[in-house]
Amino acid sequence: MYNKIVLLCLLLSNFVAFAQDGSLKISKQVITLKTTRLEINNDGFPKQCDVFDVNTEVKPQKLLFEPMHFHFYSGAKAQEKMNGIGVNITTQNADSIVWNAISTSANLKMDVQGKMLSNGVVSYHINITAINDILLTTMNFHIPFEKTATKYLAGLGEKGGLRPDTVRWQLGNWQKIKPSVWIGNDSLGLYFSLSKPTTLLPSNGAMQINVKGGSMLLDVNADQITLKKDEQVSFDFNLIITPQIPTELRIPVKKKLKFYRKLVQQS
C-alpha cells in the first residue's frame, strides 16, 4: 500500500509539472500548448481540439465531431440564426491568451470572452443580450465529441470508468453533485465544468450526455427563458484539453476529475 501511495504521489507531481510547464503560442486562431491545440471559431468557441505527439508522425487525434455551439429556439421550429463577426485577440503572451467575439441574430446579441492559461485551463464568460423582447422556448449549448474520444467518463455522479450510455444532471442537484465532468479515452479528453455565476440556467436547467447520430453529445439545456429588450443573462464555463502524455504519467480515470477541478480552482 505504501509503495502504491508513493508511486501515485510521484505520478501526480510529474503530471503537475508537465501540465504547468508550457508556453502558449498562437497562429491565426489556433492556440498551441505543448501537445494540445485549440482552434477558435469565428463565434469565439472551440472549433476543434486535438492532441499530437511532436516526436512522431502520427496524425493528431481530434476531440470534436463539430464545433461547440449554441442553439436558441423561439418556437418549435423557429431558431435564432447567429452570425459571428469574428475573433479579436486582446491579450497574447506566453502565460495567457484572451479573445472576444460577437455574434448577433434578429433578437439576440452574444458576447463571448475566452481566456486560456499556460496551465491549460480555458475559461469562458458569455453575455447574451436581448435586442428585442423574446421568449426562448429552449436553449442548448452543445459539445459534440468524436465517439472514439469518449471511452471513459468521470463526474456528474459517475465515479469514473467506462462511459454509460446516458448520463443526466439537473440544476437542482448543484449542491450535491457538482456540474463538472471529464470525458476521454486513453490519450486525450476534455474536462468541462459550469461556473457558479452563470445566470442562463433557471431551476429547470439540465445537462445530458449520450450518443446522438455520428457523435457523442454533451448538451447543456434550459427551457422557457423570457428576456425583455436589453435584458442580459450570462453563461460561464471552464475547459481543459487533456494532454497526451506517456503511459506511466497517466492519472487513473477515477482521479482525473478531482485533479482537473483543483487545477481550475487554482487558476
Image (cartoon, rainbow, N blue to C red):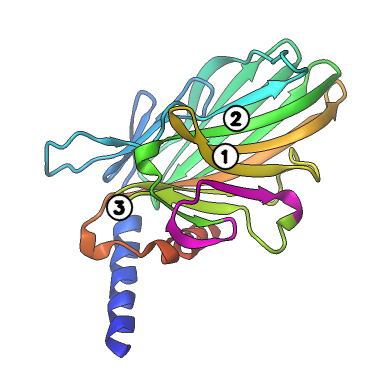
Q: Is residue 175 left or right of residue 27?
A: right
User: What are the residue bounds of the magenta stretch?
Assistant: 156-172
Mark 2 touching mark 1, by CB under 8 A?
yes
Whether residue 190 can be seen here: yes
Q: Position of residue 265 (x, y in %)?
A: 55, 60
Q: Which kind of residue does numbered mark 1 sit on?
A: Tyr
Which quadrant of the rendered structure holds the N terminus?
bottom left
Q: Is residue 224 left or right of residue 125?
A: right
The residue at which mark 2 appears reads as: 112
Camera-near label (2 vs 3) is 3
Q: Which secondary structure, mark 3? A: loop
Q: Residue furthest bottom?
A: 2
Q: Position of residue 137 (x, y in %)?
A: 79, 25
Mark 1 touching mark 3, by CB under 8 A?
no
Q: Which secondary structure, mark 2? A: strand
Q: Which kind of residue does numbered mark 3 sit on?
A: Asp
Q: Residue at x 29, y 61 (%)?
A: 250
- The answer to whether 202 is drawn above or below residue 28 in the figure is below
1 or 3: tag closer to the N-terminus: 1
Viewer-closest of 125 and 50 = 50
The residue at which mark 1 appears reads as: 124
Separation of residues labelled 1 and 3 (CA atoms) = 26 Å
State yes or no: residue 187 in magenta.
no
Q: Position of residue 220 (x, y in %)?
A: 63, 39
2 or 3: tag closer to the N-terminus: 2
- The answer to whether 131 is drawn above or below residue 267 in the figure is above
Q: Residue at x 40, y 61 (%)?
A: 253
Q: Which mark is residue 186?
A: 3
